[in-house]
Amino acid sequence: MRHLLLFLLLVMILPGCTPLHAPKISRPSFIKTDAYPLLGETGSLESIKTTVTRSLEALSRLHPEDKIMIGDRPCTVRDLKETLSSFLAILEDAKDVPDLNRRVSRKFDLYEVPGPVLFTGYYAPELAGSLEPTDRFRYPLYRRPDDLNPESGPFCLKMLPFYCEKRGYFSRKEIDTQGKLSGRGLELLFLDDPVERFFLHVQGSGTVRLPDNRVVRVRYDGSNGRPYTSLGKVLINEGRLQTNEVTLPSIKAYLRLHPGEQEQLMNRNERYIFFKTTETGPQGAGDVLLTPYRSLATDPAVIPPGSLCYYSTLFPLFNQAGEPMGWQEQEGFAVSQDTGEAIRGHQRVDIFLGEGGLAAQTAGHLKSRGKLYILLRKDKDPF
């Protein structure tokens, strides 16, 4: 979803996908650093191997000479593939993290993304639901309507959702409050909580546990093409929460404490997400399976999917009661594998955190400044 937008370069390649309103993009200059920092690692090297391999598989489906941009610099899909292939070979040969750092510094140029970069997190939640409506389960998740994108066709919709989707399709208010899609057989599942449904739209994928304990995975399958509005910013701008109070738990708490305001507040975000079931785990751009802490959502206009990255930022720590108790630096290699409607510009990165309670806790509180680097193989560096 939020997180399934493919390369913007495809706008000019796929027939019928010319955007109605092409965005004006200010491309930053990523600065090559000669003071190569010590690249630490707080995760498993096996997980980054998996991440790189998955991105290589996705890139192999694109033409190697397709043009892309990293910051304000031209690059090709081939450059990304050869960078990832070289990095994978180093991962296989490196004896330990210091050895990995030495090999990487010899083989790759490092470009610092002008910062500070704001890091947030996203995850795949689990919700209670039903295949049929009941008194408890009465809030539907909808399939993608057939008339969402009549001009460009489903292939175009799959490849470039926010460019190909029909502008001016029904808003969240029209769908959820006015029932514009009711009676069309588009209900995929029914949930028991409108607040959790709203945030499933924000996260883009998750699991739904049925009354018989079966689990159904759902994922993004298009949107109504309307702009995303941050509910946190709405609450700040209207004086309902202070800036330093806004977290995912505090937003949910406000909505639950003010049930009479829930609907009109959630309707302020006109963007609406449609879902489909899937047999696999959470996926990003190009249907890449995401890896916790290794998969990043970035703005594809400046950091396209398949870019090899290194990040360093602070992550929240929690006590046994699940309350935040401090911060700890997290750093490591990662790959851009996803995108998001709220992730715009080079100074915004969303880190995929996985599934389960800890992922939800961390995503709810992660909002830290940090550093981001892009790596390119030295003999393939186009800059």
Image: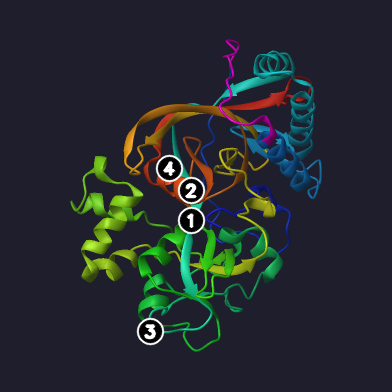
The Cα–Cα distance between marks 4 and 2, rounded to whole angstroms, is: 9 Å
C-alpha separation, residue under disc 3 versus residue under disc 1: 26 Å
Dot 4 or dot 3, earlier in sequence: 3
Assign the C terminus to one quadrant of the image: top right
Residue 120 is situated, as x and y percent measured from the top left of the image, at 44, 41
Q: Quadrant of residue 56?
A: top right
Q: How far is mark 2 from mark 3, CA to CA?
A: 30 Å
The residue under label 1 is 203
Would you call the spot at circle 3 few (<14 residues within 10 Å), some (14-19), or many (20 or more)?
A: few
Q: Which residues are the magenta region?
A: 33-46
Quarter of the image with the N terminus is bottom right
Which residue matches tag 4? 362
The residue nearer to you, when weighing 219 against 232, is: 219
Task: Between label 1 and label 4, give the one nearer the viewer.
Answer: 4
Q: Amino acid at mark 1?
A: Gln
Say whether disc 3 or disc 1 marks the residue closer to the N-terminus. 3
- The amino acid marked with disc number 3 is Asp
Dominant SS of magenta comes to: loop
Can you name the residue that lies furthest to the left here?
Answer: 239
Q: Is residue 283 rendered magenta in the image?
A: no
Label 4: state its secondary structure. helix
Q: Amino acid at mark 4?
A: Thr
Task: Name the residue at 78% across, 48% down.
Answer: 62
Does the residue at mark 2 contact the one at mark 1 (Cβ under 8 Å)? yes
Q: Disc 2 marks which residue?
A: 122
